[in-house]
Amino acid sequence: MVESRQRRQRRRHRLRKIVSGTPTRPRMVVHRSLRHIEVQLVDDVAGHSLLGLSTQSQELRERQFDSRVAQGHEVGKMIAAKAREKGIEQVVFDRGGFLYHGVVKAVADGAREAGLNF
């Protein structure tokens, strides 16, 4: 368990050296826990979050999903819709050290389907 967490931290640090967000092209950070999925759009130049959405958010809390992948896909579509309302068309995807598979991939696919470019 500890070793897998350390491997994820190593991947996360290795990615963060490369991936950086700007006000025009923010970094889309995905975090998943065993129960919830969180997505943020971060401007690394100013050091603050532009948008955030989680499965704990009010608009997603009441909805029932068949699987976590379906839940992740819906989170991706909703964060893309909110980003487009704010005029953000392009983002840099940061998987946060998680493997690009399952829920993380579903978030990315949902965001692409709703119109974000990355």
Image (cartoon, grey):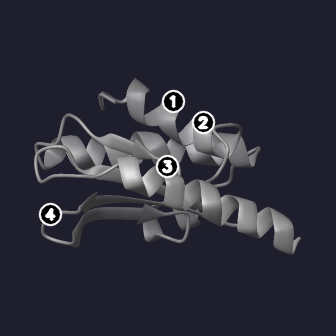
Mark closest to the chain's N terminus, 4 or 2: 4
Would residue 88 appear left or right of 102 to someone viewing this image?
left
The residue located at (58%, 64%) in the rendering is 62
* Residue 86 coordinates in the image, percent (x, y): 13, 50
> Which numbered mark, 4 or 3, is in the foreground of this view?
4
Q: Which mark is residue 105?
A: 2
Q: CA distance from mark 3 to mark 1?
A: 10 Å
* Residue 25 coordinates in the image, percent (x, y): 19, 43
Residue occupying the far right of the picture: 1
> Which numbered mark, 4 or 2, is in the foreground of this view?
4
Q: Which amino acid lies under the numbered mark 1 shown in the image of this protein?
A: Asp
Question: Dots 1 and 2: beta carbons under 8 Å?
Answer: yes
> Which numbered mark, 2 or 3, is in the foreground of this view?
2
The residue located at (49%, 49%) in the rendering is 75
Mark closest to the chain's N terminus, 3 or 1: 3
Question: Dots 3 and 1: beta carbons under 8 Å?
Answer: no
Q: Which amino acid lies under the numbered mark 3 shown in the image of this protein?
A: Val
Which residue bears the numbered disc 1?
109
Q: Secondary structure at mark 2?
A: helix
> Which numbered mark, 1 or 4, is in the foreground of this view?
4
Which residue bears the numbered disc 3?
75
